[in-house]
């Protein structure tokens, strides 16, 4: 039987504005899942802990200021930061200079290889040209491409 045959097709039920039971779902919550608002005692305890923590931190900072010269610490920190940034900039400039030197060396090698290649091709082309003219090679007829000894035997 075909799965789309009329006996297997179920009608589609869509919610209609007049029939609210098909479109609405009700959610039931149990009494245990409801959240209770925090008690006033809990609010008071949390507030007191926050005030005590803030007070302790401020007292520790005040003791730190009295024990150490914080202005000197801050100025040393800023000086170290500036020194570090200047060292970073110096290092970056040195790397950039080394990259420029490496690029120049690579350019010099490429020029040498290219120039030598051109010289070898030019010398090979000149020697091949002189040698082919010496044995009488021309681009015209097949007779002139033969060696001189072969030409003399044909003429006899």
Image (cartoon, rainbow, N blue to C red):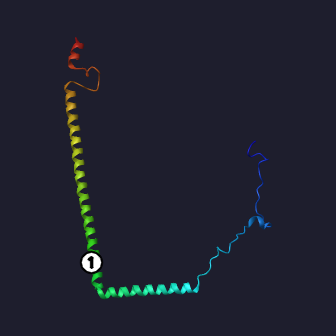
Q: Quadrant of residue 39?
A: bottom right
On the image, the x and y values in percent for residue 94 come to 24, 63
On the image, the x and y values in percent for residue 125 come to 23, 34
Residue in view at x 55 percent, y 84 percent: 42
Q: Quadrant of residue 13?
A: bottom right
Q: Nearer the viewer, residue 15 or 61?
A: 61
On the image, the x and y values in percent for residue 73 come to 28, 81
Q: Nearer the viewer, residue 58 or 73?
A: 58
Mark 1 closeness class: few <14, some 14–19, many ≥20 residues within 10 Å? few
Lateral position of residue 11 relative to residue 97, left or right: right
Label 1 element class? helix
Lateral position of residue 102 relative to residue 42, left or right: left
Specify the quadrant that holds the N terminus. top right
Q: Nearer the viewer, residue 147 or 7?
A: 7
Q: Which residue is mark 1?
A: 79
Name above or below for residue 138 compared with residue 119: above
Residue in view at x 21 percent, y 40 percent: 119
Lateral position of residue 19 relative to residue 82, left or right: right
Q: Nearer the viewer, residue 46 or 10?
A: 46
Name above or below for residue 57 compared with residue 30: below
On the image, the x and y values in percent for residue 124 come to 21, 34
Specify the quadrant that holds the C terminus. top left
């Amino acid at each position: 039987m075909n799965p789309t045959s009329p006996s297997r097709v179920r009608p589609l039920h869509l919610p209609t504005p007049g029939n609210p039971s098909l479109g609405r779902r009700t959610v039931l919550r149990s009494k245990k899942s409801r959240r209770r608002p925090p008690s006033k005692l809990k609010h008071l305890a949390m507030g007191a802990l926050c005030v005590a923590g803030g007070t302790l931190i401020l007292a520790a900072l005040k003791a730190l200021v009295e024990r150490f010269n914080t202005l000197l610490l801050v100025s040393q920190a800023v000086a170290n930061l500036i020194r570090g940034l200047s060292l970073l900039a110096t290092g970056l400039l040195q790397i950039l200079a080394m990259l420029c030197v490496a690029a120049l060396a690579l350019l010099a090698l490429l020029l040498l290889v290219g120039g030598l290649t051109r010289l070898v091709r030019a010398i090979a082309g000149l020697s091949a040209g002189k040698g082919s003219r010496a044995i009488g090679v021309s681009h015209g007829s097949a007779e002139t491409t033969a060696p001189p000894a072969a030409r003399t035997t044909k003429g006899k």
